[in-house]
Image (spheres, helix red, strand yellow):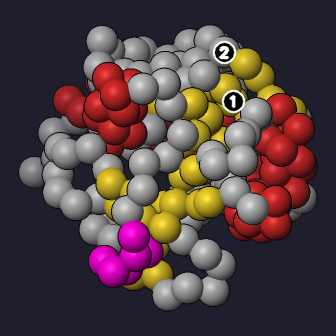
Amino acid sequence: MLPPIAPFNNPKTVLRERMKGERRAAARKRPDAAEHAASAFMRAIDRREDTIVSLYYPIKGELDTEPLVSALIEEGTRVVMPVVTKKKAPLIFRAYMPGEDLVTGPYGELTPAAGAPEATPDILVMPLLAFTREGGRLGYGGGYYDRTLEALRKQGNPLAVGYAYGEQEVDAIPLSPLDQALDWIVTERGAIRC
């Protein structure tokens, strides 16, 4: 018996599958993309002295954040990383410094250990599969960043930055009312204010 094909009729599912391949191809084509994206971020995104930036540890071909982590730490900016605590809940954020031990999360992502201090980021740098110039973001479908942004936006005004290869840009994404818009997109080609 063949598995049901209904999920592949979902436009988001179809786009996710296509964009996974696009992202892999972009990673092979632009091995220097992370350095260029980090430079674009540092030039375009305003930060105060006390700004806290959330960065992800890249998996599945996501744009590498290591050059950005290094640049932020060098200027004295505090860095945190997202942590999944339970399904369908907003993320929490734990402090991170390069060289510290990381643990594997439920989706294969690396995160700071449970003992690392928690902090609320002012800027969230997020991985994605696809983006639009208007701030649309297609993630993996778990909704973690959407729930997190919704909760943080009720408390203040965090900056949501999509971090990706330029090849991940699309004309349109089938968005739902739950999808949270990005404020900026940063790629190796530059920064786009949404």
110, above or below 28, in the image:
below
- Residue 87 in the figure: left or right of residue 194: left
Label 1 Cα neighbours within 10 Å, binned few <14 / some 14-19 / many ≥20: many
Above or below for 154 versus 106: above
Number of callouts: 2
Secondary structure under tag 1 reads strand
Q: Describe the element under mark 2 as helix, strand or loop.
A: loop
- Mark 1 vs 2: CB contact within 8 A: yes
Quadrant housing residue 124:
top right
Q: On the image, which quarter does residue 144 sit in? A: top left
Give me the C-alpha separation between circle 1 and circle 2: 7 Å
Which mark identifies residue 185?
Answer: 1
Residue 145 position, x and y percent, is 39, 39
Residue at the (19%, 45%) spot, across then down: 89
The residue lying toward the viewer, choosing from 107 and 89, is 89
Report the residue at 52% width, 60% height from top: 80
In the rendering, at what x and y percent does residue 13 appear?
Answer: 37, 33
| Magenta span of residues | 111-117
On the question of residue 112 being in view, the answer is: yes
Q: Which residue is mark 2?
A: 194
